[in-house]
Image: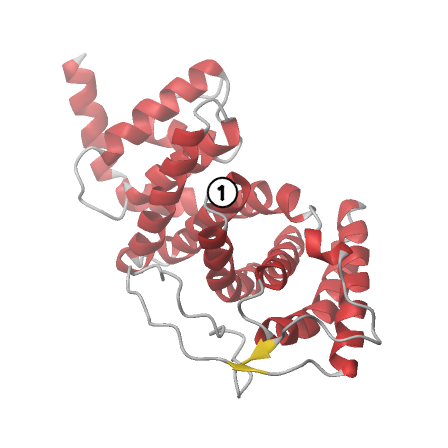
């Protein structure tokens, strides 16, 4: 047994560069696995939209609209672990035109969901892309209103899923990059929400995969480490949940390739083998574990 383990370890080390490239090929499947099913859940606030003739409750906004790639909220934890103090915000009321645009965004988002469910991803992205600017404005108007932040996070996430289904991974990465701070804020506001935590972890894993595919292990590692912390919390809260277990396994597989931390590779292998044995491993992780162990699909 020990001889076999040594041989496996040697094979793993010799093939690590090859393995990194091979594992990256499964990123598209992971986008669909983590994104598509969950993105179809409509945000609760979409059913509570203010009428176009009224003003939303206590809206606030930064004096200057935030750049989409750098949302106004800066209290979240970026992948590198640094914390930025939150800037002060200035309250203002949304205009009637902004409220009307927001109402239309809810309609467009719902239509995008219907198109996505029907397999019309091109139609879905057209609707999501139309909806997102007005939702951004609502978040800029009141960065503390978690319902609007959650709506924007969901819209960006659903848009990324639709683009991913069409193979446009550059758009997926861009949308994920914008969405991450919003998802961090949602998870911070809802610490017991396993679904949101798993979405964030899955997105971080995909951002890590994108860096790893370009051989940027230093860039990939912070994403995997942040995902690992989130995934461990989900798996601990729901140890029998296959989704949470697979997200944790994905984070372990990624982190084991970007860090020298002892035990991560063994943990990934042991967990992967156990999940292959009990049938809970998903189609994204199975090929990776087979590559790492040299096993063949049963």
Q: Residue at x 48, y 54 (%)?
A: 189
Residue lying at the far bottom of the rendered structure: 63
Q: Secondary structure at mark 1?
A: helix
Tag count in the figure? Answer: 1
Residue 19 horizontal/vertical position (percent): 34, 41
Question: Does residue 294 appear to the left or right of 102 in the view shown?
Answer: left
Q: Does residue 278 appear anywhere in the picture?
A: yes
Q: Is residue 240 above or below residue 153?
A: above
Question: Does residue 264 appear to the left or right of 137 in the view shown?
Answer: left
| Residues packed near mark 1 inside 10 Å, few (<14), some (14 to 19) or many (20 plus) | many
Figure quadrant of the N terminus: top left
Question: Does residue 198 appear to the left or right of 47 in the view shown?
Answer: left
Q: Residue at x 67, y 54 (%)?
A: 162
Residue 202 horizontal/vertical position (percent): 48, 46
Residue lying at the far front of the rendered structure: 58
Q: Is residue 198 above or below residue 128?
A: above
Q: Does residue 294 appear anywhere in the picture?
A: no
Residue that badge 1 annotates: 198
Q: Quadrant of residue 163?
A: bottom right
Residue 54 horizontal/vertical position (percent): 80, 75
Residue 87 horizontal/vertical position (percent): 40, 78
Q: Quadrant of residue 5?
A: top left
Q: Is residue 136 above or below residue 191?
A: below
């Amino acid at each position: 047994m020990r001889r076999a383990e040594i041989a496996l370890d040697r094979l793993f080390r010799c093939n690590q560069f090859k393995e990194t490239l091979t594992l990256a090929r499964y990123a598209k499947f992971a986008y669909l696995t983590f994104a598509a099913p969950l993105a179809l859940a409509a945000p609760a606030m979409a059913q509570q939209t203010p009428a176009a003739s009224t003003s939303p409750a206590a809206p606030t906004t930064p004096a200057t609209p935030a750049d989409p790639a750098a949302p106004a909220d800066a209290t979240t934890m970026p992948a590198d672990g640094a914390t930025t103090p939150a800037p002060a915000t200035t309250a203002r009321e949304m205009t009637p035109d902004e409220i009307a645009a927001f109402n239309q965004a809810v309609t467009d988002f719902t239509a995008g969901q219907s198109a996505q469910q029907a397999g019309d991803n091109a139609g879905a992205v057209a609707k999501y892309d139309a909806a997102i600017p007005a939702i951004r404005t609502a978040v800029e108007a009141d960065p503390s209103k978690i319902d609007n932040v959650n709506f924007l996070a969901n819209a960006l996430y659903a848009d990324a899923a639709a683009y991913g289904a069409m193979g446009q991974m550059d758009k997926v990465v861009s949308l994920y990059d914008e969405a991450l701070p919003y998802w961090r804020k949602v998870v911070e506001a809802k610490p017991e929400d396993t679904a949101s935590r798993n979405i964030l972890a899955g997105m971080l894993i995909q951002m890590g995969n994108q860096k790893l595919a370009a051989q940027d292990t230093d860039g990939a590692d912070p994403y995997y480490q942040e995902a690992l912390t989130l995934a461990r919390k989900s798996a601990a809260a729901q140890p029998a949940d296959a989704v949470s277990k697979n997200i944790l396994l994905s984070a372990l597989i990624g982190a084991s390739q970007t860090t020298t931390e002892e035990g991560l590779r063994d943990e990934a292998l042991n967990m992967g083998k156990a999940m292959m044995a009990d049938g809970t491993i998903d189609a994204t992780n199975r090929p990776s574990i087979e590559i790492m162990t040299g096993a063949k699909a049963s």
